[in-house]
Image (tube, rainbow, N blue to C red):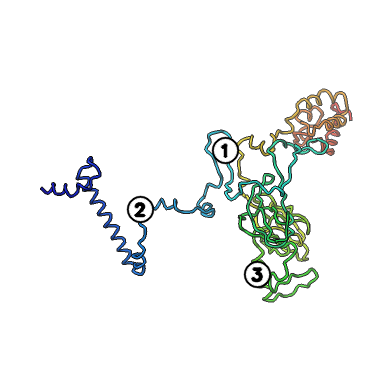
Amino acid sequence: MADTGRRVCFEHLKPNKKISWRRAETRFLTSMFSSLRGSSNLLRSLISRPQQAGRWISHPPILSTRTYVTSIWKNMKNSELSDSLSRSKELYKTYKPITPGIRHLKRPLNPHLYAGRPVRFLTVAKRKKGGRNNSGKITVRHRGGGHKRRIRTVDFKRMNPGIHDVVRIEYDPNRSAHIALLHNRDPAAVGSDKWSYIIATDGMRAGDNVQSFRQGIPDGFIPGFKEKEEGDEPSTENSAQILALGLLRSMTLKPGNVLPLRLIPPGTVINTISLKPNGPGILVRSAGSFGQVVAQDEGNRYVHVRLQSGEVRKILRDCCATIGKVSNSLWKNRSLGKAGRSRWLGIRPAVRGVAMNAFVSFFFHFVLCDLFPCHLVMTILMEVGVESLSLTSTRYRYGVGEQKAQGRGSLDLRDRRTVTRWLFVSGQEGKRSKV
């Protein structure tokens, strides 16, 4: 009798005739307990925070489905900073090795780079020469081919003062570092004064602003600051001047700003250093490189700067430099992956000089040296373009012993002093030399 009553009570909960009444009863009890549990949680929250009870009652919250803690990341907005902090090992983009060309391919991750084309009027066409000079002779080996490029006209002088906004960071195929597109806030500026490219410093992003103090600190930029002239005698600075100098450094020593070396304190990291007061920056411009101001000269004329090679160079105090480190520091650890990618960059295969042109070496050994003097043979080889000659067999054939040859594997025909000594030694030994 009891089972019949229960069956009648839960008969309306059956969505179809295939579900038994016992399963319908189980579903009803489960939903009832779930609603009670949700009501108890709501009541507990109202008791713990009674000040918000009125607002919750008048505006009941929208109850969403339960989510796991591990699924919270789906609703979070990924930022560049969080991505870089969470990435401990994945500094480079790698690929699944489905082909031999991408098995060892490794590229630095640069999601901030602009994917479009450069500004057209800030570029010029690059005409390739294949490593040849105006006479058609190859002066730089292993050059040729490659993808078509356009040269970006980078502003290395930075003569325009005022605030410039960083519009975007771009890839430059002609250099290892990235470049930044600047927009001058001056409404009177037009053309290349309005838009310009500079070498991007490490950490520079779109939306930043940079300034150039190459022409000096503007009047009234820092109240109470007065720059010393060359003829001024050193005097004890008062507290107001020290405070003004500290305020000046805090406002000007920012990555991307250009300052004279006399205004840069020792220990500052710099790049794009000029060697003339009005010349362009020519030192420290490759990816990841930086210099460092070591000390100011006592004679108030030079500034000691440590370069990337470790050399400490004395540079005029009126020369300028950019604050910060050059961008794209991971460039040196990249891997091209295949030989074709090197050809895209315009780099041809490299071969050892002593291993090339075996016919010339044979012709020199057995034909020319029996007919003509050695110095005339050297001149003929230089005219046809041969720059080095293997001494593996000639050092014994012409009397140059192992010690006298000083372990040289090849003879550089462009070095006249070495060629003269080699001909003299071979003539003294009397081995077929007609000098």
Q: Which residue is mark 3?
A: 247
Q: From mark 1 to mark 3, how far is it between C-alphas?
A: 50 Å
Tag 1 secondary structure: loop
- Residue at position x 74%, y 32% from top? 354
> x and y percent of residue 298 in the render?
76, 66
Q: Is residue 40 above or below residue 173?
A: below
Q: Position of residue 219 (x, y in %)?
A: 73, 70
Return the x and y of residue 236 as percentages of the image width and height: 72, 75
Nearest to the eye among marks 1 and 3: give it: 3
Q: Check disc 1 and give the amino acid type.
A: His
What number is the disc on residue 104? 1
Q: Residue at x 70, y 51 (%)?
A: 285
Is residue 336 positioned above or below 380 on the image? below
Disc with the residue nearer the chain's start (3 vs 2): 2
Q: In percent of the image, x 59 and y 50: which residue is there?
A: 112
Nearest to the observer: residue 159 or residue 409: 159
Q: Do callouts 1 and 3 mark residues in contact (Cβ within 8 Å)?
A: no
Q: Identity of the amino acid at label 3?
A: Leu
Q: Is residue 2 left or right of residue 294?
A: left
> Distance between the Cα atoms at labels 3 and 2?
53 Å
Res. 404 visible in picture: no
Q: CA distance from mark 1 to mark 2?
A: 44 Å
Q: Earlier in the sequence, mark 1 or mark 2?
A: 2
Looking at this view, name the residue that lies furthest to the left: 1
The quarter of the displayed image where residue 296 is located: bottom right
Of residues 362 and 268, the one nearer the viewer is 268
